Image (cartoon, rainbow, N blue to C red):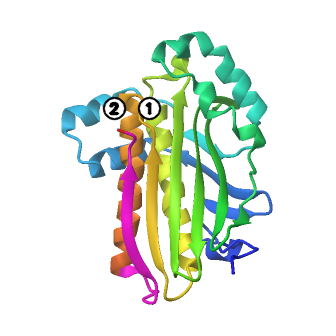
Amino acid sequence: MPRRTPLVRPRHFHPRGWLQLGPSGLRFSAKVHHRDREFECVVSGLDEPAIRDLLASSARREPASLVLNPRRPSLKAVVTHVGQDAAAAGRDGVSPMSGLQDLAIERWAFQARPGENYTVEGQSLLMVVVVDRRPVGFFSGSAELFVSDEEHFVDLIVAADMVYVSPRFRGQGYGMDLSVATGWLLGELLGAVYAATPSGSTLDVTLRADIYTTGGEHFANKLAECLEYEMDMLKEHGRRRTVRIGRFSFDGGW
């Protein structure tokens, strides 16, 4: 029988982690410092000139604040700020509004939706970069679980729909901050899903991303790197030997 309540519960999240689950859904808040950008550049395997170029523009600015599905700034405020960039953003060939327009009607709470022989649970994601209380960029997507108790599998599916930084704030490393924070979020979410997966089940992970720009490609590759790393760590060091870590699939849209 399909589940009527979510498999993932608040107790499955690390009590001191950035990511928590409450009545209103997933909650995440963190700051990305310059040392975090330096570390992420090194582990990404970039050569030194590329690392210098990426870090030079962000070395002196304040750490970025990143908040998931924030109440302040609200979704309406994010839409308003992005709308003010519409003329400049249109030159990129993809409207950033496409990453926001459907969020207003989505369920934000982490909810279960029973199917015939399976359950789908999860929610929309909107990670916002906040500078001086103003939204200057965002990542939008979703995280869902396909759970089948009969077939003993859980599939964590992450959809990366849009990553956007206001033209006035580009070239300052905010896109990198978005990728770092979203990678942290997905790593902690995968850990919680692993803790919740029923014994005897296989846990698979799928990342789906539509790639429109070079920056978007780098962002999606960073998320794939984070998820693969966390899966490898669970295979090597995970304590739940009755849970099998299965395959990782990456659909980049090309």
Label 1 vs label 2: CA separation? 7 Å
- Looking at numbered disc 2 in the image, what kind of residue is underneath it? Leu
The reply to whether the magenta stretch includes residue 9 is no
Q: How busy is the neighbourhood of tag 1: few (under 14 within 10 Å), some, or many (20 plus)?
A: many
State the quadrant of the C terminus. Answer: top left
Residue sitting nearer the eye, 58 or 23 = 23
Kindly identify the residue that appears in the image at 75 percent across and 29 percent down.
Answer: 77
Residue sitting nearer the eye, 101 or 215 = 101
User: Residue 54 got which mark?
Assistant: 2
Residue at the top extreme, as displayed = 87
Residue sitting nearer the eye, 48 or 161 = 161
Left or right, 84 with respect to 22, comes to left
Left or right, 140 with respect to 170, comes to right
Give the residue pinned by disc 1: 173
Question: Which residue range is magenta in the image?
Answer: 237-253
Residue sitting nearer the eye, 49 or 222 = 222
Mark 1 or mark 2: name the one nearer the start of the chain.
Answer: 2
